[in-house]
Image: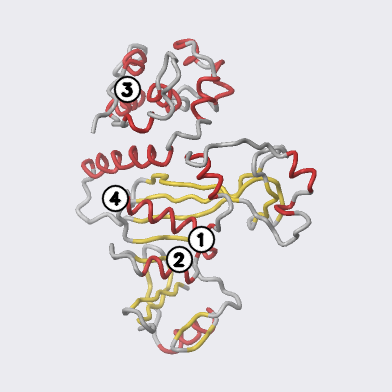
């Protein structure tokens, strides 16, 4: 498969840096060596512009190096003095709904995985782990597309914005962002869906996209549950060749649907999740028990193990659930 080899932008930039500036010099060399395939830009490189898709992408990746906060600050940066292309070029590129950003992220990450493995001098096998978590994206305006009223479980307050779901990969030393999606909270009040009045709903920004575009796929994901979307993300990572030993989540994602999905994977991975110390019932020894009940039984039936590195006590229990293979359960104290 052919890939773009145009390194004109990087070659022009390197003459402004000496080899003694190792950080910048190394970064430019890494960007030069990235293989980004033509197919990613087939749908967007149709206009007759001076800079093609990969060149715009490289300039965007260089924004943090030149302390460019975002596209709106590009005009005041040294990059603008070098290339003189307007910021609309980057806005159009970033907003193109036919750009497959997910495929691009996986392409770059897989290349970085291979390079880090070659540089690793550890004698032990790395512990490969997928980490899933969600966070709040609060917005000041009221006219964003698909804006909703969200509840923060950290501050216990309401705000306007989005819920972001993220999937990352950790090998014990490095962390890579693999995938993400944005979601809203519709709420139970049918008169104010997504916490907005009818007037506020009409004021939200709206645009039409092709049904086959990647941008429209993102819009469709907005209405899915975070658990189902996380399962889709993990399926996609496995299909892209990402292999992992554990999936790590917090108590919000510890549910039957996700645990069943991980337990049935042929790549032999395990689920690590927190359990809420509440009234939720769990099947243990053929009984429906709360977490505190399970912990009380374990305290009286066996001695706690201690992990010096993590400085915590834990109990290990082997169960044979119905219609399932032998499974191990760990309860940390």
Q: In what quadrant of the picture does the N terminus appear?
A: top left
- Secondary element at tag 2: helix
Residue 143 is left or right of residue 283, and the answer is: right
Of callouts 3 and 2, the N-terminal one: 3
Disc 4 crowd rating (10 Å Cα; few below 14, some 14-19, many 20+) is: few
Occupied quadrant, residue 225: bottom right
Of callouts 1 and 2, the N-terminal one: 1
Which label number is shown at residue 258?
2
Contact flag, marks 1 and 2 (Cβ < 8 Å): yes
- Secondary element at tag 3: helix
Seen from the viewer's position, the closer of residues 309 and 129 is 129
Q: In whole angstroms, how far apart are the C-alphas of marks 1 and 2?
A: 7 Å
- Secondary element at tag 1: helix
Residue drawn at x 49%, y 10% as measured from the top left: 84
Q: How is the image coloured?
A: secondary structure
Q: In whole angstroms, how far apart are the C-alphas of marks 1 and 4?
A: 22 Å
Say which residue label 4 marks. Answer: 241
Residue drawn at x 36%, y 16% as measured from the top left: 9
Q: Is 238 situated above or below 292?
A: above
Of callouts 3 and 1, the N-terminal one: 3
Of callouts 4 and 2, the N-terminal one: 4
Residue 231: x and y in percent read 44, 59
- Secondary element at tag 4: loop
Of callouts 1 and 4, the N-terminal one: 1
Between marks 3 and 2 in the image, the one whose residue lies nearer the viewer: 2
Say which residue label 3 marks. Answer: 25
């Amino acid at each position: 498969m052919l890939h773009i080899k145009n390194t004109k932008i990087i070659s022009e930039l390197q003459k402004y840096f000496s080899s003694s500036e190792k950080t910048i010099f190394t970064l430019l060399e890494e960007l030069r060596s990235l293989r980004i395939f033509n197919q990613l830009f087939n749908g967007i490189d149709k206009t007759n512009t001076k800079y093609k898709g990969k060149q715009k992408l490289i300039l965007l990746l260089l924004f943090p190096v030149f302390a460019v906060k975002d596209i709106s600050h590009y005009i005041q940066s040294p990059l603008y003095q070098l290339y003189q292309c307007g910021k609309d070029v980057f806005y159009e590129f970033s907003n193109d709904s036919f750009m497959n950003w997910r495929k691009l992220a996986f392409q770059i990450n897989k290349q970085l995985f291979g390079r880090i493995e070659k540089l690793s001098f550890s004698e032990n096998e790395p512990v490969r782990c997928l980490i899933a978590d969600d966070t709040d994206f609060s917005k000041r305006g009221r006219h964003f597309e698909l804006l909703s009223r969200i509840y923060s479980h950290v501050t216990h307050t309401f705000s306007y914005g989005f819920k972001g779901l993220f999937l990352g990969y950790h090998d014990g030393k490095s962390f890579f962002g693999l995938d993400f999606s944005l979601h809203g909270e519709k709420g139970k009040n049918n008169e104010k869906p997504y916490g907005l009045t009818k007037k506020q709903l009409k004021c939200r920004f709206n645009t039409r996209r092709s049904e086959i575009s990647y941008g429209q796929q993102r819009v469709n994901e907005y209405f899915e549950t975070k658990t189902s979307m996380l399962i889709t993300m993990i399926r996609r990572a496995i299909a892209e060749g990402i292999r992992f030993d554990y999936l790590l989540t917090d108590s919000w994602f510890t549910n039957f649907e996700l645990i069943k999905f991980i337990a049935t994977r042929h790549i032999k991975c395990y689920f690590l999740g927190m359990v809420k110390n509440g009234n939720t019932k769990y099947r243990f020894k053929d009984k429906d028990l709360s977490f505190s009940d399970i912990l009380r039984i374990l305290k009286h039936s066996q001695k706690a193990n201690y992990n010096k590195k993590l400085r915590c006590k834990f109990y290990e229990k082997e169960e044979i659930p119905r219609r399932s293979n032998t499974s191990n359960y760990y309860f940390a104290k």
